[in-house]
Image (cartoon, helix red, strand yellow):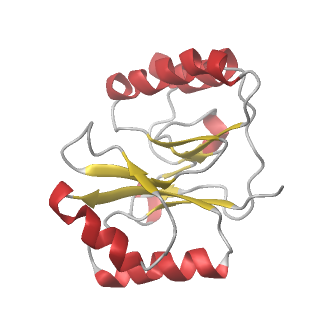
Amino acid sequence: MVMTIGSWNIRGLNSPHKQNLIQQWVSKNSLDIIGILEPHILPSNMDAVVAGMGISNWNFLSNIQHHHLCRILVDGSVFRASFVYGLNTPAERATIWRYLITEKTHNTFVPWGIIGDFNAIMSSRDRQGGDSNWYNHMEDYPNCVSQAELIHLPATGMHFTWHNGRKGDATILKKLDWA
């Protein structure tokens, strides 16, 4: 069985316009599983947002019980899937790296897909502009991938998935989204 999986860092899903965009994206790409990152949904608004997407017969899960604002919203499925939103500092991301390394033992015989915005790069070729130093904390993600025995899936489209919004010499580009 082939399943089509998508992940979108939507940066807010409370507006009907963005909910409609999700519905169109799911329909256009015939997605079976979706991970919506940074939806920023308050607990009191969760049911309205899920209803507003108009995707019937889907079972949504979220991490709202672990954070005051929903950062990940996922449609559940039979196989194991992890949708990652890496927080902004190396110290905050350390929990994710420990989790992935620990969880590899539970996925020896279970298909496990991990996709999302890791807020980390694998190597210096995954960034352009900005500080060119390679700091010790930048080894955390590559070490995690190695220790958890993960394999990066090939990606299509643009290599860099994040832009600092500046132009000219101030431009910084990074590949922060991985599967």
The quarter holding residue 86 reads: top left
Residue 119 horizontal side relative to residue 66, left or right: right
Residue drawn at (45%, 20%) of the image: 137
Residue 72 visible in the shown view: yes
In the rendered view, tell whether residue 60 sits above or below residue 62: below
Q: Position of residue 113 (x, y in %)?
A: 66, 41
Residue 97 in the figure: left or right of residue 156: left
x and y, in percent, of residue 96 in the image: 45, 27
Which of these two is toward me, 102 or 168? 102
Rendering coords of residue 94 (x, y %): 41, 21
The quadrant the N terminus occupies is bottom right
Most foreground residue, 45 or 78: 78
Outermost residue, front direction?
57
Q: Residue at x 27, y 66 (%)?
A: 47
Quarter of image, res 27:
bottom right
Q: Nearer the viewer, residue 170 or 72?
A: 72
The reply to whether residue 135 is in sight is no
**Image quadrant in which you'd find residue 51:** bottom left
Rendered position, 74 above or below 100? below
How many marks the image carries: the answer is 0
- The percent coordinates of residue 42 (x first, y second) are 19, 58
Name which residue lies at 52% across and 20% down.
140
